[in-house]
Amino acid sequence: DQQVKQNSPSLSVQEGRISILNCDYTNSMFDYFLWYKKYPAEGPTFLISISSIKDKNEDGRFTVFLNKSAKHLSLHIVPSQPGDSAVYFCAVGNTGKLIFGQGTTLQVKP
Amino acid sequence: GAGVSQSPSNKVTEKGKDVELRCDPISGHTALYWYRQSLGQGLEFLIYFQGNSAPDKSGLPSDRFSAERTGGSVSTLTIQRTQQEDSAVYLCASSPVVGDNSPLHFGNGTRLTVT
C-alpha cells in the first residue's frame, strides 16, 4: 500500500514554460515534505522542502505548494530549463525515515 | 568536502552467492540510511542507523538482508544467497542528525545484478 504516490510517470515541457509535478500522500500525520532530483547514474539530491505549518516555500525557480486538506504536494519550476530534465521524487518525513514516491521523469525540450 | 561514498559502484554476482555493499557517510553525520531502487520503481526504504544502532529495520525484504554500522561511520549491507529479484541500485544516504527536517545526502549507489 503506497503511502506516497506520484501518478504521472513522465512529463514533457517546453523550455521557458512552467513544469508542475504532483504528489499525493495518505497519512495526515506526515509533517515534513521534500523534493529530490535525480540524474542518471547519480544519487538523488535535495531540492526543496516544506513543513506542514506552511503552504508554500519558494527557492529561486522552484516553489513547493502544500495542500494539507487534500494531502497533495506540488513542485513548480518556472521557467523550465533543459538542465532541469531529470527524475523528480517527492518524499515525506515519517518518524526518522523518508518515504519516497515512484518518481516523475521531467523532460524539458529546447 | 567529500560526499557519501559507496563501493563497489557495480557488482555482478551469481544467484546464491553472498554480497557485501559498503557505504562511507559524510564525516560527522550520525544518521545513515539504506534504500534501493529496482528497475522502474521508486526508492524503497530498507533500514536506518542512528549512530551504531538501527531503530528501524522494517524495510529489509527478508532475513537474507542484514546491515551493520561500526564506529558510527562505515556501514555494510549484506545480502546472503542472492536472488534475481535482489537486482537493483542500492543507495546509501547520511544526514547530520535523524529528523524529518534534515535532508539526506545520497551516494551514487551500487548497481547490483544477480545473474
Image: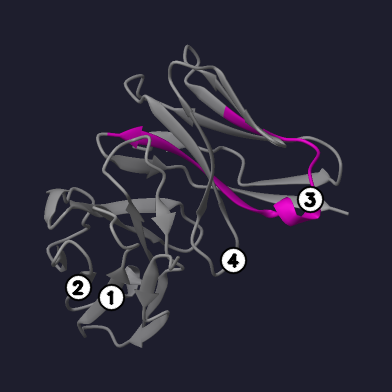
Location of residue A100 by image quarter: top left
Residue A108, horizontal then vertical, whole percent: 79, 50
Quick check: marks 4 and 1 in contact, CB under 8 Å? no
Q: Disc 2 is attached to a residue of which chain?
A: B
Q: Name which residue lies at 38% across and 71% down.
A: B5
Q: Name which residue lies at 60% across and 32% down.
A: A22
Does B84 appear above or below A73?
below
Tag 1: amino acid: Leu
Q: Tell me the quadrant of the picture where the N terminus of chain A can be found.
A: top left
Can marks 4 and 2 be said to lie on one chain?
no
Q: Which mark is residue A40?
A: 4
Tag 3: amino acid: Val
User: Would you say A89 lies left or right of A109 here?
Assistant: left
Q: Which residues are magenta?
A: A74-94
Q: Disc 1 is attached to a residue of which chain?
A: B
Tag 2: amino acid: Thr
Precedes in sequence: disc 1 or disc 2 = 1
Question: Which secondary structure class fits the magenta region best?
Answer: strand
Tag 4: amino acid: Pro
Let me know if residue B112 is in the magenta part: no
Can marks 4 and 3 be said to lie on one chain?
yes
Q: Which mark is residue B78?
A: 2
Does B18 appear above or below B87?
below
Residue holding disc 3: A108
Q: Which mark is residue B21?
A: 1
Precedes in sequence: disc 4 or disc 3 = 4
